[in-house]
């Protein structure tokens, strides 16, 4: 009999206690001599909650994958002229959050999608009140252009697969008299007839590339099919039937390993997931947390791990915005999100913030009316805010860095004046330090109490790009930023800092990185922002709160990885002149105070986590 | 069916909404303790658990308007010197999307 090592390449080990697990332990079996338990790390399947659509809707077309997806069109069922409400909505997904993109020129529900996030086709579907359509539109990641017209009106939810220049669709509803077995290939400009699907049906699941495609089930009118066929770009070959009747499901995978989930699986709006292993179908133990169908899903995929579903509905009455992503690995993944934190004792405008979400510190600020410059200091323990000794010089439009027990508070304004005052906090009281070389307000900063950095801001009548370093005693002038601005945000340390956003007067997307001596331009933020807050380090920063201009705060959150920006899960509240920060990474961030309303609320960010857990092996 | 449901509930701080809530349904806060929530089972359950008083969109907007109007009137009553304080912008209307 073969040994475990001969089969899996790893020997069964003995440990006194369970080891610290990482990916190298996948497939490793060990005997824990401490408790007499045999364990291993094995992969498992699960659907993971991801970022929600900005506009909840159903009958949504999808493209791309769970880390680079698209949701196109759709509807709020049962509304008047439903496709005219959300039928042109386009949102892109990065695995964390959805971002609104340019609306599609077509308004459709029940449309089909294929391709990637930056090269997608949206075709067919239903446009109220005109009816079924053959029109299509192509998306290049930023804008839409007209695409090739399908040979007939077509409605094939879960139809369409492949790439923009090598796409295909099989089956669909063509209007009276009914369903079709027609298969057509798309070359980036026009559709060409190909070998017919072995059966006629609508809502046929199409997945895979043009030369290795797959089709599953569909509504044969009457009857829901269990058919499973492979496509080579010109003809079809029947395979072992799906283990249940299916139509209009979420799909992902290849001819050797594919999944169908959600949609109609024996019954409508199911949560079930079926998996094809290359020879047979079986029920995968993973289920959608929210039973539903007709959400956005892959337009092209190379693995079952590309699978996702966003939005969708149950019975055309309850509509969702939530995303669930399929994951088969040894990791338990929990996606990042913001949650509510403690309530400030004094709601106010806040600028900057020291510490992180479990050990925060804010001071100063502004409330009106009556116009009042604040001197209150509050510490946060991750649950509640508590008042501390007031700061020496009441002010606002300052910046604040460091930790709860060693913070640095600098610059700012008060009615009728600008200050370069600097104070340090030691966890109980404030002490005055040497002033900034250039008194200013609406500035930003980074670093610590003994290695601080101040940059940008306003010295009436204009804005400055001045940069100063603090060594724990005094400030020294450094090279200016390239773009002078105010109400900007900053994070990082003195030798690796990021300045972003701000403006004068309009908000900008400008990013600059400081290396301890000079600034270089970084990639632009995805959304212009000023009057927000920021936290983290250069390679893992987060910017939140603020907005394009004071009247229009937004909930957009962006993360910076040292090279580029990407959208993160949004905050629940839209506020400008909000404070907060993080001295750790992005996941330590908190946001508090701000307007409108001089709010007292706090939000805390919890980043995405991946953990490896051992499975206990039993004999049964 | 409406896209969203609206309710009034005081943000009680930690735990008022969790990261899990945010992953499950759309949630956005507005002045006057108005919350706009995705109209689905999870959103409705959250509203019920928080004891939120459900409002129509028009009622929710009226509450927001009342709070913003009060803030605008208070701002208007300030002296010119107070109004000129940096960052002391007049409160602007907040419109539910």
Image: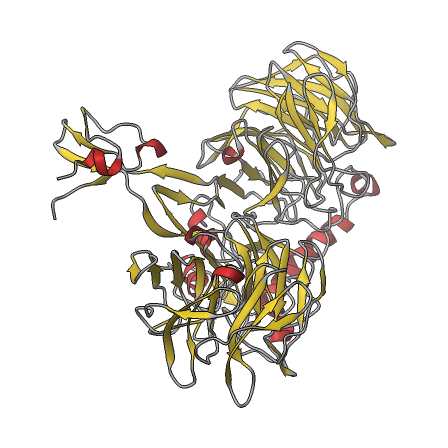
Depicted A190 relative to depicted A131: above or below: above
**Quadrant of residue A222 in the image?**
bottom left
- Nearest the camera: B51 or A608? A608
**Quadrant of residue A538 in the image?**
top right
Depicted A579 relative to depicted A450: above or below: below
Depicted A488 relative to depicted A212: above or below: above
- Image position of A301 (left or right of A504): left
- Image position of A74 (left or right of A202): right
Position in image of residue A296 (x %, y %)? 52, 63
Position in image of residue A601 (x %, y %)? 54, 44
Judged from this view, the residue extending furthest toward the top is A473
Position in image of residue A345 (x %, y %)? 53, 38
- Nearest the camera: A170 or A463? A170
> What quarter of the picture does the N terminus of chain A occupy?
top left
Residue A213 seen by the camera: yes
Residue A54 seen by the camera: no
Residue appearing at x 76%, y 49% in the figure? B90
Residue appearing at x 76%, y 41% in the figure? A508
- Image position of A96 (left or right of A304): right
Position in image of residue A554 (x %, y %)? 65, 49
């Amino acid at each position: 009999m073969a040994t475990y090592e001969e089969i899996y390449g790893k020997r069964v080990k003995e440990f006194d206690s369970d080891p610290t697990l990482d990916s190298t332990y996948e497939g490793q079996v060990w005997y824990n001599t401490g408790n007499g338990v045999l364990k291993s790390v094995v992969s498992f399947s699960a659907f993971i909650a991801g970022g929600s659509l900005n506009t909840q809707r159903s009958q949504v077309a999808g493209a791309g994958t769970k880390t680079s997806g698209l949701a196109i069109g759709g509807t709020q069922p049962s509304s008047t002229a439903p496709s005219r409400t959300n039928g042109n909505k386009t949102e892109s997904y990065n695995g964390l959050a959805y971002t609104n993109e340019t609306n599609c020129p077509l308004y459709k529900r029940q449309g089909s999608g294929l391709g990637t996030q930056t090269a997608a086709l949206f075709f067919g579907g239903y446009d109220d009140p005109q009816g079924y359509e053959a029109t299509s539109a192509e998306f290049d990641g930023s804008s839409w252009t007209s695409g090739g017209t399908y040979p007939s009106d077509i409605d094939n939810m879960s139809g369409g697969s492949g790439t923009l220049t090598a796409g295909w669709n099989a089956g669909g509803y063509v209007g009276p008299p009914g369903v079709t077995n027609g298969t057509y290939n798309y070359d980036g400009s026009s559709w060409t007839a190909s070998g017919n699907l072995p059966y006629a049906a609508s809502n046929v699941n199409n997945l895979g590339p043009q030369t290795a495609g797959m089709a599953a089930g569909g509504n044969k009118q009457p009857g829901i099919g269990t058919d499973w066929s492979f496509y080579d770009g010109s003809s079809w070959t029947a395979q072992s039937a799906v283990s249940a009747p299916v139509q209009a499901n979420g799909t992902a995978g290849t001819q050797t390993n594919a999944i169908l989930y959600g949609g109609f699986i024996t019954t409508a709006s199911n949560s079930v997931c079926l998996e094809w292993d290359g020879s047979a179908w079986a029920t995968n133990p993973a289920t959608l947390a929210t039973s539903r169908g007709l959400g956005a899903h892959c337009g092209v995929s190379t693995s079952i791990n590309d699978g996702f579903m966003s939005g969708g509905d149950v019975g055309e009455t309850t509509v969702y915005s939530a995303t669930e992503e399929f994951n088969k690995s040894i990791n338990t993944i929990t996606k990042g999100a913001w949650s509510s934190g403690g309530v400030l004792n004094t709601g106010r405008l806040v600028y900057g913030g020291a510490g992180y979400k479990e050990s925060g510190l804010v001071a100063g600020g502004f409330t009106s009316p009556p116009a009042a410059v604040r001197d209150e200091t509050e510490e946060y323990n991750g649950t509640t805010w508590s008042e501390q000794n007031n700061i020496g010089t009441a002010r606002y439009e300052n910046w604040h860095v460091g930790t709860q027990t060693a913070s640095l508070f600098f610059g700012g304004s008060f009615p009728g004046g600008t200050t370069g005052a600097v104070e340090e906090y030691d966890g109980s009281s404030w002490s005055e330090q040497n002033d900034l070389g250039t008194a200013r307000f609406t500035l930003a900063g980074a670093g610590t109490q003994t290695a601080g950095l101040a940059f940008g801001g306003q010295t009436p009548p204009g804005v400055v790009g001045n940069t100063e370093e603090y060594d724990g005693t005094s400030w020294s002038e450094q090279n200016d930023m390239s773009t002078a601005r105010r109400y900007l945000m900053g994070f990082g340390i003195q030798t690796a800092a990021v300045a972003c956003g701000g403006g004068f007067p309009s908000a900008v997307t400008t990013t600059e990185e400081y290396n301890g001596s000079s600034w270089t331009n970084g990639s632009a933020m995805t959304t212009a922002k000023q009057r927000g807050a920021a936290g983290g380090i250069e390679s893992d920063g987060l910017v939140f709160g603020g907005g394009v201009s004071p009247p229009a705060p937004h909930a957009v959150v962006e993360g910076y990885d040292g090279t580029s920006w990407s959208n993160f899960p949004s905050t629940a509240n839209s506020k400008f002149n909000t404070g907060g920060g993080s001295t750790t990474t992005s996941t330590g961030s908190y946001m508090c105070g701000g307007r409108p309303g001089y709010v007292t609320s706090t939000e805390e960010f919890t980043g995405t986590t991946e953990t490896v857990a051992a499975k206990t092996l039993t004999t049964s | 069916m409406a896209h969203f449901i609206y309710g009034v509930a005081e943000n009680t701080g930690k735990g008022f909404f969790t990261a899990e809530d945010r992953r499950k349904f759309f949630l956005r806060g507005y002045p006057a303790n108005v919350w706009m929530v995705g109209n689905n089972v999870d959103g409705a359950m959250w509203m019920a658990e928080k004891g939120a008083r459900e409002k129509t969109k028009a009622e929710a907007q009226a509450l927001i308007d009342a709070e913003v109007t009060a803030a605008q009137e208070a701002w208007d009553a300030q002296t010119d010197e107070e109004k000129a304080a940096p960052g002391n912008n007049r409160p602007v209307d907040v419109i539910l999307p």
